[in-house]
Image (spheres, grey):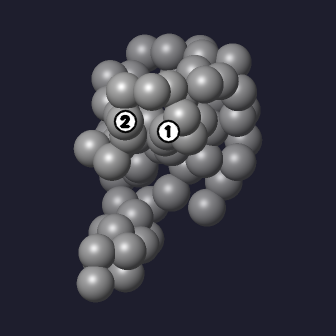
Amino acid sequence: MSTDQHTAQAAELDWFKSSYSGTSGGDCVEVAVDLDVVYVQDSKAAGGGPVLRVGRGEWAAFVALTTE
């Protein structure tokens, strides 16, 4: 896992908000998928905040744990 700043690369990705995000502008995350990496960022800081970079296998394990 990496929390390196990837603003140039992050701007080129197709980001989408969590399906659990409401329309009231509360706490939301955005996710973008690349070949073997999943990127996660705070939607309120999109394009200017830190980006979490996680391997696809690790992301799949995390999502499996959160949906049980």
Image vertical order of residue 5 relative to residue 48, above or below: below
Quadrant (top left, top right, bottom left, bottom right) of the C terminus: bottom left
User: Dot 1 lies on which element?
Assistant: loop
Residue drawn where x is 72% and y is 41% of the image: 4
Q: How many marks?
A: 2
Q: Is residue 1 something one can see in this rendering? A: yes
The answer to the question of whether label 1 and label 2 lie on touching residues, with beta carbons closer than 8 A, is yes
Q: Amino acid at mark 1?
A: Cys
In the foreground, 65 or 33:
65
Q: Amino acid at mark 2?
A: Gly
Q: Is residue 57 something one can see in this rendering? A: no
Q: Which mark is residue 28?
A: 1
Q: Residues within 10 Å of mark 2 (few under 14, many from 20)?
A: few
Residue 59 in percent (x, y) is at: 40, 64
User: Dot 2 lies on which element?
Assistant: loop
Image vertical order of residue 65 relative to residue 15, above or below: below
Q: Residues within 10 Å of mark 1 (few under 14, many from 20)?
A: some
Tell me the residue that label 2 is attached to: 22
In the foreground, 25 or 61:
25
Residue drawn where x is 60% and y is 25% of the image: 44
Q: CA distance from mark 1 to mark 2?
A: 8 Å
